[in-house]
Image (cartoon, helix red, strand yellow):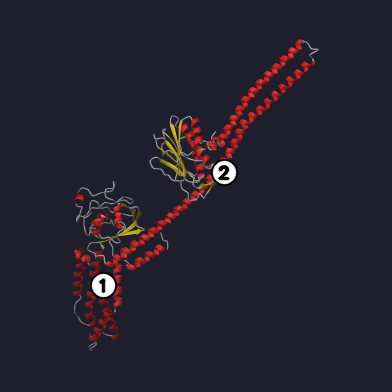
Amino acid sequence: MTGPHRQLLAAAVLTAAAVTATCAVPRLLGGADPTWSVPVSVDAVLLVAGVGAGALPWARRRSERLLMIAADLACLAGIAALGLVAAIAVLGHRPLDGGDDFTGPVLIATALAAITATRARTRATNVVLDVVRGARYEPEDVLRRFGEDASRGADLDETLSGLGEALRRSLSLQRVEIWTGAAGRLTAAVVLPEGSGGLPGNDPATDPGTPGASVAPGTSVVPGVPGVPRASGTDAARSGPGGGLGDDIRLVEVGSTITLTVSDRVALSRTRVAGPGWLSLWVPVLARMHEHAQLRVIPARAGGALLGMIVVRRPLEAPRFSEPEDRMLAELGTRLGTVLHNRQLDANLRDALADLRHANDELRVSRARLVATADAERRRIERDLHDGAQQQLVSLAVGLRLVRDLVADSADSADGADGATGTGTDADSAENAARRNEDVAAADELLAAMAEQVAETIAEVRNLAHGIYPPLLRSSGLTEALRAAGQRSTVGVTVRADEIGRYPADIEAAVYFCCLEALQNAAKHAAECSVELVLAEREGALTFTVQDNGAGFDPRRLERGHGMTNMADRIGAIGGTLRWESALGAGTQVHGVVPVSIFRGDPGDGSWQPADLRGSMAPGQPTDPARAVGSVRPGGSVRPGDAVRPGDAAGHPESAVPR
């Protein structure tokens, strides 16, 4: 039984009670008429009329007014009966039984009591209304309660649910919907009454037999969106005006979504309260969702942006929305927009703080990783020096001692030969000469071998120094150093530099070794490819891109190795960002951006000093979502989903300082 039906039946019951109380007055005065059959018959007729009135539209539209009149009559009759009972109690007998005619004074006193009991009648009427339709809120109470809930920081869902319930009871609404969202995509946060199905065409009392279609939470209610149920067959034949559920109408539940076009949002931003006529002209999608009902749509705006809306509905037969009610709804929409805007700012602040904490954690991890990498590199350099150059130098020292011994033996042989010239034989002289010749030949062989060892040692030390910091990078800059690295690579490398200059050693080293690691990965995983390396300076940032035309890799099969981590740490340590893009058959691109405007001084005299890195953001974001597979935040940490070429999981421990 719907609200108007309950109100009409309650009005019939209260009217019957008033008739019964009125008929009881003569009996209380001592009379014999009327008999009790009269009020019983009248009450039965009233009850039948109350049930039948629910089928009449004009009666349903006036059901609340009829209920208030019936409640007032019942209260008036009850007070009169109570006054008469009080008079009889004071007299000690009924007026007609004592012989004296006190009927006039008693009736006058009873009538005066009933008429002057205005407060009691008003209170009784309100109690009846509350019992029939629930506790009622005054418009001022709705605004005050919403303000209190919003100011005390209650959960947004709880606040909106309380607002919807207060609106429904205050304005005797059939349905209340509160939508929230941004950028035109709104989600139903509150739908009251819950599970009612929502649309006027589905009310069995107003449109019996009208078909309905349910929409699961989270489904779009926008006409034309695939996957949304639509009326079809006989249902579609009955849709349209007067036929109940239109072809584009969707039933709304909590979690359903609707997407408004730009024109819809602009139109809603120019009104405070919209009725069905205005909506049919400017936002027809909302009008179609709520046909066959009195409708009000109240946009919730802040700063010109549509953050939500309130949709309220009454049956066609219910009292029309009054001007004070429209003013209250408009004020409520303004306050709701402010609340939603503040909650959005709070959420953004919480997200920013969470990101900041996460970035700080990542920075600590990155710093620890950099320290560990530096320690590992020092140990590697020590090992390389011990096993390489040091062993070569030890071998040279041994060879030099051998040469010295040979030279000493040859000198001794020569001295002995000179002392024995006059006494020795020609055979002894020949033997000494032969021995000296052998020593000289052996010394020549040792010196030749040591010369080769010296050359090898020089090359090994040069290679080691090149891995620590390439001399060409120090003397000529990034462009020449990377061109030399490209010439040494096993793949074809083209280097393009758009008038870049010199930068601090830390920046040049980080970019150089990052590009070198990318070239090594290309040579390892795309051996038959060619690589293009582009350097440029734009908008105060040094950008570099290493693009190969190899097979690429599947972004869904991502692995993160040491090589990528080292690259991220190097670029992140100087405030830059790093991004990988790849797709099967489309090659792989490594793109880095390093702010250089945050440094001041002359790189030539070593006076470059980093300025405050906080808040610096390097330009450039992925332009193709299908290719973007990851990025690295300042600090060097890698976000979830970042990728490196397949096989890099094994890592390149030496990649921080390539050999």
The residue closer to the viewer here, 149 or 53, is 149
Q: Residues within 10 Å of mark 2 (few under 14, many from 20)?
A: few
According to the picture, the residue beneath numbered tag 1 turns out to be: 71
Residue 158 to residue 587: above or below: below
**Mark with earlier residue (1, 2):** 1
Relative horizontal placement of residue 477, taking residue 440 as reference (left or right): left
User: What's the amino acid at mark 2?
Assistant: Gly
Q: Secondary structure at mark 1?
A: helix
Q: Residue 186 or 440: which is nearer the viewer?
A: 440
Position in image of residue 447 (x %, y %): 65, 23
Q: Position of residue 120 (x, y in %)?
A: 30, 76
Amino acid type, label 1:
Ala
Residue tagged 2: 606
At 31% from the left and 76% from the top, the residue drawn is 119
How many C-alpha atoms fall within 10 Å of the one at disc 1: few (<14), some, or many (≥20)?
many
Residue furthest to the right in view is: 423
Q: Residue at x 45, y 53 (%)?
A: 352
Q: Front-most of 173 and 143?
A: 143
Q: CA distance from mark 1 to mark 2?
A: 94 Å
Q: Position of residue 537 (x, y in %)?
A: 46, 42
Residue closer to the observer: 465 or 12 = 465
Asked if one can make out residue 176 in the rendered structure from this viewpoint, the answer is no
Say if 501 sits above or below 527 in the image: below
Name the spot of residue 554 as percent of width and height, x first.
41, 37
Numbered circle sitting on residue 364: none
Image quadrant containing the N terminus: bottom left
Left-right relation of 575 to 215: right
Quick check: 172 above or below 280?
below
Question: Callout 2: helix, strand or loop?
Answer: loop
Q: Residue furthest top?
A: 426
